[in-house]
Amino acid sequence: MKRVFILGWFSYPRGNATANYVQYLAKALQEEGFCVTVMSALNPEFKLSDGDVIGGITVRNIRWESKFSYIRRLMNGRLFPFVLAGKIAELRLTSDDILIAPTSLPAISTLFRLKKKYKFKTIGYPLEWFGVEQYKTPREAKKGEVQFQLNANHDLLFPISYHIRNQFPKTPALVLPIMADVTEFPFVPKKMDVCRFILPANGMMKDALPEMLHGLALLTKEELSRLEFHFTGVTENQIKSILNGFEYEKIKNSVILHDWMKYENLISLYQNMHFLLLARDTNQMTLSNFPSKVPEVMTYGVVPVVSRVGDYTKYYLKDGVNSVVFEGCDANSCAKAIRRAMSFSEEEYIEISSKARECVERQFDYHNWTKKIKQAIESMYSENE
């Protein structure tokens, strides 16, 4: 049984979108008989310790813990390459072992150096490709691009989008979108008493929040009275900083803000939502990314109302079938998309909601990807024979 170690600077499990991506990847590997260990920071919500097993997956903590903040900063910053090297040495890796890691991992150069020493295989999972405009300075942009190009040093890539995959034509790759697990939580039929939209705004820098808010403010008072717009990860002060006083007063009774919540509570919220609104501009970052919130909410029959950008609208979502796909991401386009979603009859909504759920079952559920993942991994070894 081959050992696979998935590394990353995320909070496992359920700490963020990357943690969810890794969880489903780990499950897919486990399904095919691999012995899987996730090496990351541990989510304190789950009260895990180094070496614990959760869902059949062993977890190892790579974040240095100390009651002294300066020691934590030092060991998880400048000295992290030595911490990582020590963790890897403990694993007694051989050429049969596989490390899956992003090039954004601090000390990725250390990982590649150890790869030459111990002869293990590495797989990259690039989930982002930021443009120059996403960095604070040109120097940071250059450093980020150099680090991104290190993906070519892996034996295999699991890029999250074809836009990223096309940057590394010489590196073997399997394009792997964010996956899901339709069996993890129950599907609950929805009531159509009020039209409920949700925007989980974690990773908000990719989403056109001002345009969505201004679009909401373009609705009439009568239209606003028939909907609820739920936000997670957005504060009232953020909304007030975007809207003028008149706009805010107009929409405030239709807006419901949610503080941080446990993942089970977030799922309960999804189970009561009808639509996800997600507007994004077209740029290098949005073309490269695959928002985890799309398949995540579709698992519970939530219908995506999204602007056309990226792999999810090109390969998976079909306008009027399992989603509402609209052009552009300006306020008027958002308002028109919201109105179109609200115009569905209950029968039409039930049909499109069931198709959204069906899309996840057939294309995003990790069980559909296990054999492809195994074949891609096996090809790393057959090419060297």
Image (cartoon, rainbow, N blue to C red):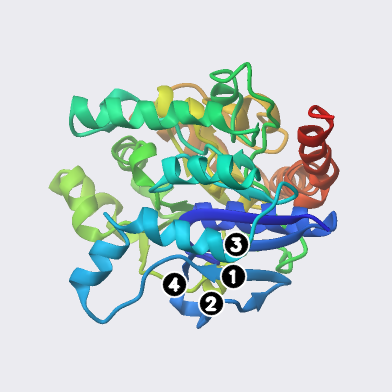
Q: Are there few (<14), some (14-19), or many (20+) residues within 10 Å of tag 1?
A: many
Amino acid type at mark 1? Val
Amino acid type at mark 3? Val
- Residue 140 to residue 10: above or below: above
Q: CA distance from mark 1 to mark 3?
A: 5 Å
Q: Nearer the viewer, residue 240 or 252?
A: 240
Q: Are marks 4 and 2 in contact (CB under 8 Å)?
A: no
Q: Nearer the viewer, residue 115 or 153?
A: 115
**Circle nearer the N terminus (1, 4):** 1
Residue picked out by circle 2: 50
Residue picked out by circle 4: 261
Q: CA distance from mark 1 to mark 4?
A: 23 Å
Q: Which mark is residue 59?
A: 1
Determine whether, in the image, residue 382 is placed left or right of residue 73: right
**Circle nearer the N terminus (4, 2):** 2
Q: Are marks 1 and 4 in contact (CB under 8 Å)?
A: no
Q: CA distance from mark 3 to mark 2?
A: 10 Å
Q: Are marks 1 and 2 in contact (CB under 8 Å)?
A: yes
Amino acid type at mark 2? Asp
**Circle nearer the N terminus (3, 2):** 3
Q: Quadrant of residue 200?
A: bottom left
Q: Are there few (<14), some (14-19), or many (20+) residues within 10 Å of tag 3?
A: many
From the top left corner, tell me how far across and down residue 31 is, in percent: 83, 58
Residue picked out by circle 3: 38
**Circle nearer the N terminus (1, 3):** 3
From the top left corner, tell me how far across and down residue 327 is, in percent: 49, 21
Can residue 195 be seen here? no
**Circle nearer the N terminus (4, 3):** 3
Q: Are marks 1 and 3 in contact (CB under 8 Å)?
A: yes
Residue at 38% of width from left, 57% of height from top? Answer: 82
- Residue 344 to residue 311: above or below: below
Q: Quadrant of the C terminus?
A: top right
